[in-house]
Amino acid sequence: MGKVVLVTGVARHLGGRFVRRIKREPEVDRVIGVDAVPPEHDLGGAVFVRADIRHPMIAKVLAEHSVDTVVHMDVTGTPLGSGGRASVKETNVIGTMQLLGACQKSPTVRRLVVKSTTSVYGSAPRDPAVFTETMLPKALPTGGFAKDAVEVEGYVRGFARRRPDVAVAVLRFANILGPKGGTPLADYLSLPVLPTVLGYDPRLQFVHEDDVIDVLRLASVEPRRGTLNSGTFNVAGDGVLLLSQCSRRLGRPTVPVLLPAITWLGQFVRTAGILDFSPEQIRLLTHGRIVDTTQMRETLGYTPRYTTPEAFRDFARSHGPGLLPPDQVARAVDRLAAVLPPASEPKEHSAHG
Amino acid sequence: MADAKVIPFDEDGRGRRGAKASRVRNGRKRSDAGGGLAPLPLPEQPLPAQAGAGDAQQPQESPRPPTAAEIAADAEKRTEGLAEAFNHALGAAADRLLGGTWERKVAHGLAFLRRRVTGDYEVDEFGYDRELTDQVLMSLMRPLFRDYFRVEVRGVENIPDTGGALVVANHSGTLPLDALMTQIAVHDHHPKGRHLRLLAADLVFVLPVVNELARKAGHTLACAEDAQLLLERGEVVGVMPEGFKGLGKPFSERYKLQRFGRGGFVSTALRTGVPIVPCSIVGAEEIYPMVGNARTLARLLGFPYFPVTPTFPWLGPLGAVPLPTKWTIQFGEPIPTDGYPAEAAEDPMLVFNLTDQVRETIQHTLYKLLVQRRSVFF
């Protein structure tokens, strides 16, 4: 008899993709997708159960289908459709508590995978440049999605202690980018003009959607020989991009704003509902955040297919160039080079060299 | 001791020596810049002249009376010729100003600009932008290093050619100019042109603009995690364990080393097994003679101290100009740490002893250099 996988948060793009992917695994027998709202996309033959994970009903779903693997993807920063920050927080925190409570009662659950985020590390100037899984942040996130994620991880650790027979994997993803966007950072990068914090150039790290799906799949099945897929793992593409580099590669001009002013602007934009520009997001765009992925490579045995610049390129390609497309800017420089008369020969050389 | 014998000659021929050194350095830089352009020996100088001559020949070849169209064309040619001549003059001026290879420099600069504006460059996890540091940030600091402080670098070969090393230096001068000068000293004088990755105080990463530049120049926060990561990757890491205690000490205590933190740098070196290179910097103490400390103002601004010098803040921004002291940076014999067992980093006694050894070495070298020094400014 094959595995029965329950996935939460399938109404979202990423959840839908994961359900379709895990359904194709040979050792997986059935996939049950759970969300409070019906998904708009196809779930590829998975069973959809409309259930709110904030209610105890989820325990019945677990028992009814004798689920052995739970993939909790309903920890997100943005509301789906209507609903404010309060309902998101409730789904994140109360939903996780209910789900974990149900898992603890269920005798069949053998494996739990939780989608978390690297924002649990916060962003502060006094932090080390590169975070490893065992590091504690100097300043815990004070609110928003990052705080939810910290609390969720706390409950998951409690669950792992109470049910040592269940393999628990907590996957801390860096900022997810893909052709479809949908994350707060992707929304920010889609603005025609990027407001930045004056005097700061944050280091950013991205992970491609395809890698997210692959890592989730790897964590939800039996570990391969020589690897271990329970524990906490940072998941991010290799390499680093500065925000200034991102804006240049996207061709979107930046407007440096003083830090106090941008906090105010963020509040305004948020209340106007244009964009989720939370204080946590502003901190990321001030100090940046880089994580170490040695554990992902060596213990989990996964090598990302996309590096950070490649993931970013894929995102940029699907979003089209901004107001200052990089190739046009490059052409302008080339024209400038052509105007300056004598040194046209070596220019070609050094441009390639 | 050998150094001590060399010094008197150095005093006599300093001007000549400095000029020679800078010429040598220029030469090296030029050959670096032209690395990819080897097949072009020196065609730049005659090029504009040839082009100008070619243009000027054509109007002379028409002996018959010129038509209106020809006159117009001729005028156009002449303006072109004028432009050429102007370009030529400009080129000659630029040649004199920038030293012969200005065209290559412009081309190089444009290629650089092209990469910058399209975001086509790489940074590491610490935000270190190697290209920007080499091309812009270092070049901006170099006049200060070469012409203003006239830094004399000794013993730079004590830094290994490959692999990690921890450079431990004294810290002074109110503003951390000594750290930046050491960075240039290592890069410009080391035979392998190694890059010094400095560990900076957390205040640096709180301040806007400063933090951005510091990260791009390869500095990172002075914490064990970052230092260990850099050393494991085989980088040369620079640390100034005195921190603000050394940087902001009063002028009366110049060249007296302060406490060396808690010896964290030694345990990191022990953990990674890299050699410790003691480094003594003479000259930085006198750039801003700090005679007082406005503590209340410092607390208000959130700084560890607020310097009062004979000129600052009395003369305003003019008072912030450092005094043109003559500097010496001496790198000492490396102290190996790879002979200790793995648990040595956890042994406080050993860590304290090594810390003291490094501190004493730097202090003694400082005294030795001070005795040899004839004047603060020359």
Image (cartoon, grey):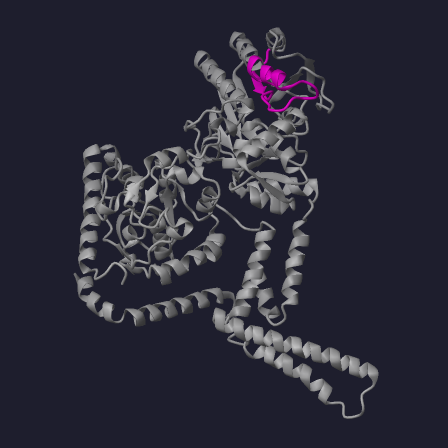
User: Can residue B273 be found in the magenta stretch?
Assistant: no
Please provide the residue range marked out in magenta: A66-94
Residue B96 image point, x, y percent: 49, 73
- Residue A166 visible from this viewpoint: no
Residue B185 image point, x, y percent: 34, 57
User: Can residue A81 be found in the magenta stretch?
Assistant: yes
Q: In this view, does A154 lie to the left or right of B16?
A: right
Q: Residue at x 68, y 43 (%)?
A: A317
Residue A204 image point, x, y percent: 53, 38
Q: Residue at x 36, y 60 (%)?
A: B148
Residue A134 image point, x, y percent: 41, 28
Q: Quadrant of the N terminus of chain B?
A: bottom left
Q: In which quarter of the image is the C terminus of chain B?
A: bottom left
The answer to whether residue B28 is above or below residue B117 is: below
Q: In this view, does B151 lie to the left or right of B9?
A: right
Q: Quadrant of residue B219?
A: top left
- Residue B334 versus residue B254: which sits nearer the camera? B254
